[in-house]
Image (cartoon, rainbow, N blue to C red):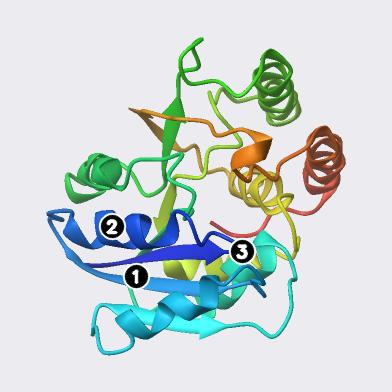
Amino acid sequence: MKLSILMPVYNERNTLENAVKRVLDVDYPVDVELVIVDDGSTDGTRDLYVQWEQDSRVVLNQKPSNGGKGSAIRKAAELATGDYVIICDADLEYAPEEIPDLLRPVLRGEAEVVYGTRTFGSHNAYSYVYVLGNRAVTTFANVLFNCYISDLETCFKLLPLDLYRSLDVRSAGFGMEAELTGKILRSGIRPYEVPISYKARGREEGKKLTWRDGVYALGILSRERVRRPRAA
């Protein structure tokens, strides 16, 4: 089994080097590749990529302009060669060292799709409104699809590459998280959930998600609910 770690990057000069190092230093139980897609960074992030050009574990792609997280992940999925994929942002809100925990249910034959679910507390949440919004979107999905998931907006989503491609996620921005989950649930698949840690950053540190993304997610979930299910 080979795992492709998809890393969308936009203006992450301060965290990218550490993020890549941490991803590559993990002791994985499978072969891995790191697919980095730069989504039109303008803060000097692109000056950092030369150091990984000769690393056989790293695939680099630089888009000419910013198209949003969803478009960057879509490009990364086109370049990926693994059996499974997982999204890992370059902002270090998530710990790459916990990716093997999501692989274990798959390797044991217990799951096909695995979500890393976050527990929010005063030490790791960006704000009460942010947490409340995430819970509202997640609850909305649970009601729509008559299921129970704990964290729809989690970045750590592990699934087969062929499945991801077949779902044809089109949302260009952060709405891709809701679209991906909506299509997975509509296909009759229920993600296996694994607890993970989380360390939110603030606006001054580069956090890009806003309340508008939450409202947009509700519309995407409603759209996916009424569409004809894809074959799982």
- As drawn, the label of residue 173 is none
Amino acid bearing label 2: Val
The residues bearing labels 1 and 2 have C-alpha atoms spaced at a distance of 8 Å
Residue in the picture at 60% in, 25% down: 147
The residues bearing labels 3 and 1 have C-alpha atoms spaced at a distance of 16 Å
**In this rendering, the label closer to the viewer, 2 or 3:** 3
Can you identify the residue that label 3 sits on?
10
Residue in the picture at 54% in, 64% down: 8
- Residue sitting nearer the eye, 35 or 103: 35
Total residue callouts: 3
- Residue sitting nearer the eye, 187 or 156: 156
Residue in the picture at 74% in, 50% down: 175
Q: Are marks 1 and 2 in contact (CB under 8 Å)?
A: yes
Relative to 165, say whether 195 is above or below: above
Relative to 77, say whether 50 is above or below: below
**In this rendering, the label closer to the viewer, 3 or 1:** 3
Q: 151 left or right of 172?
A: left
Earlier sequence position, callout 2 versus callout 3 = 3
Residue in the picture at 62% in, 33% down: 202
Location of residue 70 (image quadrant): bottom right
Looking at the rendered structure, the secondary structure element under dot 1 is strand
Can you identify the residue that label 2 sits on?
23
- Residue sitting nearer the eye, 160 or 127: 127
Can you identify the residue that label 1 sits on?
34
Residue 168 appears at what percent x and percent y? 66, 68
Relative to 110, say whether 139 is above or below: above
The residues bearing labels 2 and 3 have C-alpha atoms spaced at a distance of 17 Å
